[in-house]
Amino acid sequence: QVQLVESGGGLVQPGGSLRLSCAASGFTFSSAAMSWYRQAPGKERDLVAFTTATGSIIHYTDSVKGRFTISRDNTKNTVYLQMNSLKPEDTAVYYCNAKRSGANRYDYWGQGTQVTVSS
């Protein structure tokens, strides 16, 4: 049974930090590209950060560059999103995604964790 379980969300003041975690099980984590997406109320779900299976390629959406850091620990089957200098516009539900292309392709999603940046 595939599971992606996000944690670490919450309420934080502008300028604060949060660290999101996504614990994976039920598939070969080290073979999956991992991403964080977010969806604000009334908006589409957008990519925030992406890392390849080995972590050799990392991509960030422009609005979070220099503030957010994605990392993965293949020994713990976990991907992280360190979020610093948070802004009110970062408020959203954050989702973890696991994807593999090719013959054994898959596309899995977590249930999401709420991040609210407000004073």
Image: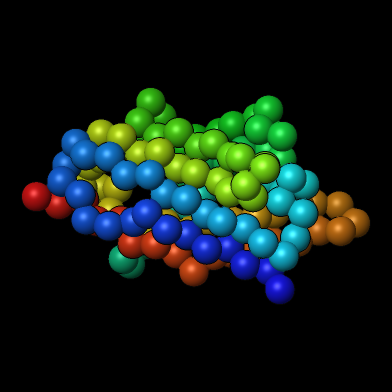
Residue 21 vs residue 105: left or right?
left
Relative to 67, say whether 47 is above or below. below
Q: Would you say residue 63 is visible in this rendering?
A: no
Q: Measured from the top left, where is residue 52 in percent x and y?
A: 68, 38
Residue name at image x 81 percent, y 58 percent? 105
Residue 110 vs residue 90: left or right?
right
Q: Measured from the top left, where is residue 116 in percent x and y?
A: 24, 56
Tell how many labels: 0
Give 8 or 91, whichever is nearer the viewer.
8
Q: Residue furthest bottom?
A: 1
Q: Residue furthest left?
A: 119
Relative to 16, say whether 107 is above or below. below
Quarter of the figure that contains the N terminus = bottom right
Q: Would you say residue 66 is visible in this rendering?
A: yes
Q: Measured from the top left, where is residue 95 in percent x and y?
A: 48, 59
Residue name at image x 67 percent, y 62 percent? 25
Q: How is the image coloured?
A: rainbow
Relative to 2, say whether 68 is above or below. above
Residue name at image x 52 percent, y 54 percent? 22
Residue name at image x 49 percent, y 44 percent? 80
Q: Measured from the top left, where is residue 73 in percent x and y?
A: 61, 40
Q: Residue furthest right?
A: 103
Give 117 or 63, whichever is nearer the viewer.
117
